[in-house]
Image (cartoon, helix red, strand yellow):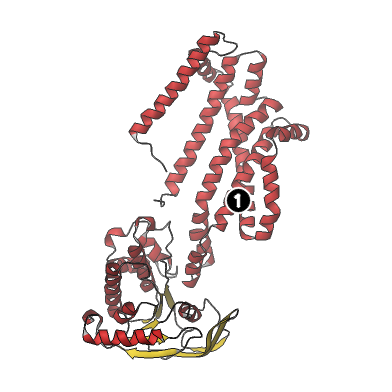
Amino acid sequence: MKLEIKGLYKKFGKLTLFNDFNIEFQDGTISSILGPSGCGKTTLLNIIGDIVKADSGILTGFREKTISYIFQDARLLPWKTVEENIEFVLGRDIPVVRRKEISAQLIRLMELEDFADYYPSKLSGGMRQRVSIARAFAYPSDIILMDEPLKGLDIKLKLNLIRIFSRMWQADKRTVIFVTHDVDEALLLGNEIIVLSPAPAGIILKKQVDIPFEKRILESDYFRELKKSLISALGN
Amino acid sequence: MKILSTGKKYISLASVIFMLVVWKLLAMHFDSAFIVPSPEKTLVTTLKLFTDLSFLRIVGSTIARGLIGFAISLVLGIGTGIITGINANLDAFLRPVLVTIRSVPVISIILLALIWFNPGLVPVFIGMLTMFPFIATNVSDGIRSIDRDLVGMAEFYKVSTDRIVRELYIPAVMPFIVSGASSALGIGWRAIITGEVLSQPEFGIGTMMQTAQTFLNIDAIIAWTLIAVLISFVFEKSIRWIEGRFINWRS
């Protein structure tokens, strides 16, 4: 099934973010979208997620899909524990026993066992984001939207989250659209990397990366070359 | 919730002893039960009050007035708070009303209430009117402080509206209701007893104070005051207990 956006137009006041913009995504892959700040990456996610209305444009394949969203900030309910936060998004049509099973499983996969009954105020930023990822995977979605969820985390935490996320995804290959302005993140976590121009956004470069996540070494010649071409594309 | 460390507890105890010593010194200085009765004598008077046959009725009446006033102001306050928290225009309209109610001297309201209501109802009305603005403004602030991003998240994940209200709005506003209720009751007891002093209902702590004052029973005035302080203290502690019990998620 094809996921496609055609002839997208979106303006905020005088700022034109999208002017006849086209993009497509492969089902069951992780697409990393790289672009400078303010190029409309988040708006693109919000249009896909139906949070923001496009001025015009045709979206194919999205509306009939269920979508999870990993926001830039974790957006956890402060009065719910880790477990309760994950369970929060599960519909009440799912029996309570099943809901508990799902959240327990994700807590295990995200390595959150020791923190299941912690309140978010007791968690670090990286841990909170892990809960947010667990919540996105707990939700029975086909597509996961990610809006720079690693922003503001230190490099060690970033690598750790990328490792957990990619392992999670190997077990449950949903379509992921991952927006970032960090080239390394895009390289480590994309089957496909799409570079956007400043607003109004257009696709400058599209690269396929077929190396499995666990074998990606940023210091290798392949990735160094790739990184160079992405940075020069971003620079233009 | 703050928990006093043992060291701090001793300091608080020292503070109470200090107040008692100052009291004792003042009593010795004036050496007159009509000006400052001694702490021991007052304590005896206080204990005697407990044995008074109508003690429970007197204290019960004051507490009942307080609770009725509080319940009404809680319902009205939460209602007004929700409306003004959601609608900015209604908020702009009602803020001056609340500020006015808050700034009017309690005594003015009592004098008017004495004309409008029967004696038993005056303290209830006073209590209600002094407590209501605290709860209303707090709830209103609470509603406005709700994190729109959290609501956005819940809506994105198609959480039903009634669950958003129950699991997001209510827990978010709860701390504001509790702190509003706490400051409201703090002011409320004082207002209610003042109301009783002036309206002279058949039973009430204020009525007893007024009677004691007429007969220059200074120790009785202070004894009833101690009981009023005790009531206020017990309710403040209960609210803190409720807060600790239900709002345990804050670090």
Q: For this view, does A65 lie left or right of residue B96?
A: left
Foreground residue among B103 and B226: B103
Q: Residue at x 44, y 78 (%)?
A: A67
Q: Chain of mark 1?
A: B
Q: In the picture shown, does residue A30 fall above or below B226?
A: below
Total numbered circles: 1
**Where is residue B197 shown, x and y percent of the image?**
67, 25
**Where is residue A76 shown, x and y percent of the image?**
42, 63
Q: Residue at x 63, y 45 (%)?
A: B133
Q: Residue at x 65, y 17 (%)?
A: B213
Foreground residue among B210 and A185: A185
Quadrant, the N terminus of chain A:
bottom left
Q: In the picture shown, does residue A131 fall above or below A225?
A: above
Foreground residue among A71 and B161: A71
Q: In the picture shown, does residue B169 fall above or below B176?
A: below
The image quarter in which residue A126 lies: bottom left
**Where is residue B173 shown, x and y percent of the image?**
53, 54
Identity, as a three-letter code, of the amino acid under mark 1? Ile
Q: For this view, does B145 lie left or right of residue B16?
A: right
The image quarter in which residue A193 lies: bottom left
> Mark 1 = which residue?
B78
